[in-house]
Amino acid sequence: MIVPASTPGITIKRMLSVFGFDDAPHGHGHITFENVRVSNNLMVLGPGRGFEIIQGRLGPGRIHHAMRSIGAVSFRPLILLSNPLPLTPILLLLL
């Protein structure tokens, strides 16, 4: 169902960060639904098709978060190369 955020009973508690980034007000949020009443014309695709809708929505999100993780991991070696560790006697033994 698609329900307007202004519907009585919907409370947005707070916005959540993902991988340290705050995407408010567009990102993920802690939302509660208490006694929310909606009409049948707000149903998407029809009864019993919720799993199909959710899987269609989760796929792109999984790819998005995986790509963000790959980007963060790819950036880390650049940081390490730009701030090299001082050569201590222990590091010299490893060379």
Image (tube, rainbow, N blue to C red):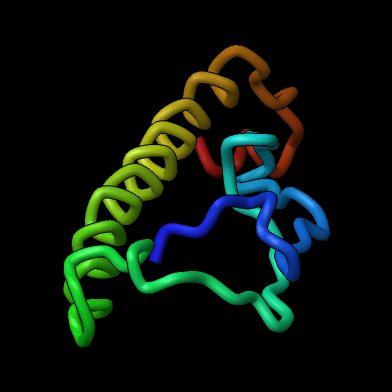
Query: x, y percentage for residue 88?
Result: 75, 32
Residue 21 position (above or below residue 51): above
**Residue 9 or 93: which is nearer the viewer?**
9
Residue 67 position (above or below residue 78): below
Count the numbered circles shown.
0
Q: Residue furthest right?
A: 13
49 relative to 4 in the view: left or right: left
Which quarter of the picture shows residue 73? top left
Viewport quadrant of the N terminus: bottom left
41 relative to 95 in the view: left or right: left
32 relative to 66 in the view: left or right: right
**Residue 94 or 61: which is nearer the viewer?**
61
User: Residue drawn at (29%, 69%), measured in percent from left and top?
Assistant: 54
Query: x, y percentage for residue 93?
Result: 60, 42
User: Residue drawn at (72%, 72%), measured in percent from left and top?
Assistant: 32
Q: Residue furthest top?
A: 82
Query: x, y percentage for residue 30?
Result: 71, 63
**Residue 31 or 18: which is nearer the viewer?**
31
**Residue 39 or 53: which is nearer the viewer?**
39
